[in-house]
Amino acid sequence: MYPIKIIFIFCLLIASDTDAFSQRLEKFVSRERSHERNGAIVPVAYPDIANYFGYLAPDTSSRSAQAEPAKTYLYFWLRENVSELGIRVISPVPELVFPDKGDIASESYMINEKDKADSFSPSFKLYKAKGISPATTYNAKPGEIEWSFIAENDKQKDEPWTQVNKKNYTLVRLQDQSTDASKTDRSGFYKLVIFTTDTLSSTGSFLVQVGSTSDIKSIKIAEKPEGM
């Protein structure tokens, strides 16, 4: 039997590691760039990542007695084709993670930043606009856009490449089976619908990250499609 002192120290180490994990942001790993060595995966992060800080809350503006389910719509352009595109949503925003230069923080996040520890179990669906490409002039209204469903939560399928399996998070990763990226043209206009099916906790901060193996610094995530 182990001495009580050793057990106590071991428990402290576990608690410390768990607390540190909740405070920092684990790197967003690219499956394409990562590789196996001696039976172990060597994770390599996406070289470029776009960040969006948001806060999900039920819509209480309706006249009905019950608030509308919490849901957030986000949009972004992918103006060039890529061989791998990764999108993940994490809640809550880790304690030691803050918006940096080039990141986008929503008004709701800034208002509720003091409550950034609030969390929910995130889900999201990804859509791509039909008939809209980087070469076209975008002037359609949101209601006039026809969207094609692309993917939704596939976190379980992504193990062991996922680096944040201890967090409330979800992800979608689009990747060519072939190294020839031209076979699948992913350039275009995208919509994310972020929501939660958790009836006990539907409010909290979240971080959206869009990563690619190509240079995507031109990607801008926005709450409205107009003016993009």
Image (cartoon, grey):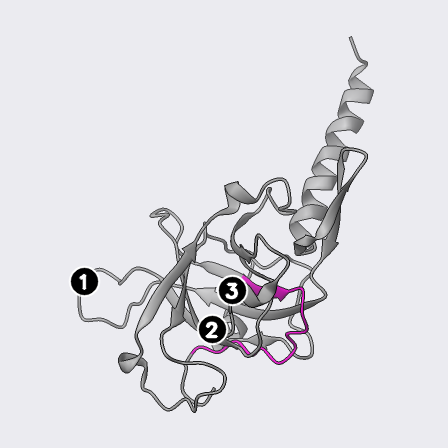
Amino acid at pointer 3: Thr
For this view, does 172 lie left or right of residue 180? Answer: left
* Pick the front one: 73 or 17: 73
Could you tell which of marks 3 and 1 lies nearer the N-terminus?
Answer: 1
Task: Look at the image and tell me whether residue 26 can be seen.
Answer: no
Residue 192 % position (x, y): 43, 66
Q: Secondary structure at mark 3?
A: loop
Most extreme residue toward the top is 1
Task: Look at the image and tell me whether residue 220 can be seen.
Answer: yes
Q: Which residue is mark 2?
A: 108
Mainly helix, strand or loop, the magenta region? loop
Instruction: Name the quadrant of the N terminus.
Output: top right
Q: Residues within 10 Å of mark 2 (few under 14, many from 20)?
A: some
Q: Residues within 10 Å of mark 3 (few under 14, many from 20)?
A: some
Q: Are marks 3 and 1 in contact (CB under 8 Å)?
A: no
Amino acid at pointer 2: Ser
**Viewer-side label of 3, 1:** 3
Q: Quadrant of residue 50?
A: bottom right
Q: Which residue is mark 1?
A: 65
**Magenta stretch?**
207-223
Q: Secondary structure at mark 1?
A: loop
Q: Which residue is mark 3?
A: 184
For the point 53% across and 51% down, which residue is it? 169
Q: Secondary structure at mark 2?
A: helix
User: Does residue 149 lie above or below 201 as drawn?
Assistant: below
* Pick the front one: 190 or 184: 184
Total numbered labels placed on residues in the image: 3
The answer for how far apart the CA atoms under marks 2 and 3 are is 36 Å
